[in-house]
Amino acid sequence: MKTLKVETGRPYDIIIEKGIIENCGEYIKKVSKAFKVAVISDTNVFPIYGEKVISSCKAAGFETCCFTFEAGEHSKNLSTVSKMYDFLAENHLTRKDLIVALGGGVTGDMAGFAAASYLRGIDFVQIPTSLLSQVDSSVGGKTGVDISAGKNLVGAFWQPVLVLIDSSTLSTLPRYYVEDGMAEVIKYGCIKDKALFEKLENKNAMDVIDDIIYNCVSIKRDVVSRDERDTGERVLLNFGHTMGHALEKLNNFSTLSHGQGVAIGMVMLTKSAEKAGLTQSGTAERIEKLCKKYNLPTYSDLPKKDIANAASTDKKTSGKSVELVLLKEIGESYTKKTELSEFEKFISV
Ligand code: MG
């Protein structure tokens, strides 16, 4: 078992252990005086793990209730959250009670937002079941939903009281979803951890997945502890994301996954940065090779003009400029403020 402490305003632990879902109730008991636990999950994950979580919570002495919603990004909206509020109220959850978010990023973001806002905030525990949510979205306290103007535009910073990561859940995921998460894993190596990058090059990630999750989560933990509200260093976590989000948007968030967009973004941006003399040469090729190893795409032939336009409406873009995250070399990242008018030129080289 590996434990990481997150020193945000309200500190909490992240525990990584295969099979921990079966005993989640015990761990929740240590951090909560709740009478009732509401398990929130989706129609893919609940049938596999829902009963395990509920019986473990019952064994630990909690009363339980469960809410499931239709799996998929299309459910991540205020109408689903509104149904959650009604459910929580009907089940008489009080401020002392607790929500368990059981599932991938959509579930964590949305159940976290319900926890942040119901009764002006109740405790919640993250049990992420996808690689992307285990290495990324379950840590850091960003919660929220999509609105028609864009993804994650309504939400709150709200830290969980505990994160339980059980990598054995990855074996029930279609390969595609594991690969999707690998893009974020590669990103952590690129921005902060050369040794992690080399581990991914030299080994099969799934053989050492608990170590890898630990590496990623500790990087994110360190960054988030220093910049909980996303006003400084946290921007480094967006490496590959400005282009990635733009590509996701241009594909209407359907044919390209988040990880695929990020992979293409990391490679294409680093190629341009190398040409501009801003990144050590040979870096893009290594990232490209690694992405290909994990079946991730590395190139988009969409017009650069369209990519730049889509990037200009990203919520990470402030005013007329964008804070590009670049690599000095593998494992070392920095930011460079770039005028939006220059961005198209930059990525066209
Ligand atoms: Mg991401």
Image (spheres, rainbow, N blue to C red):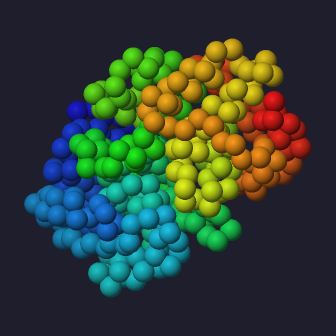
The answer to whether residue 326 is above or below residue 303 is above
**Can the viewer see residue 96 in this picture?**
no
Question: Residue at the front extreme?
Answer: 301
Residue at 37% of width from left, 72% of height from top?
69
Q: Is residue 220 left or right of residue 55?
A: right
Farthest residue, direction right = 341
Look at 69% across and 43% down and name the residue there.
301
Q: Position of residue 261 (x, y in %)?
A: 59, 45
| Visible residue check, residue 107 | yes
What count of labels does the image hold? 0
Percent position (x, y) of residue 10? 45, 48
Which of these two is toward me, 123 or 152?
152
Q: Quadrant of the N terminus?
A: top left
Left or right: where does residue 106 sit relative to residue 243?
A: left
Considering only vertical position in the picture, is 294 above or below 53?
Answer: above
Query: Residue at left 77%, top 46%?
Result: 303
Q: Residue furthest top?
A: 281
Residue drawn at (35%, 77%), measured in percent from left and top?
88
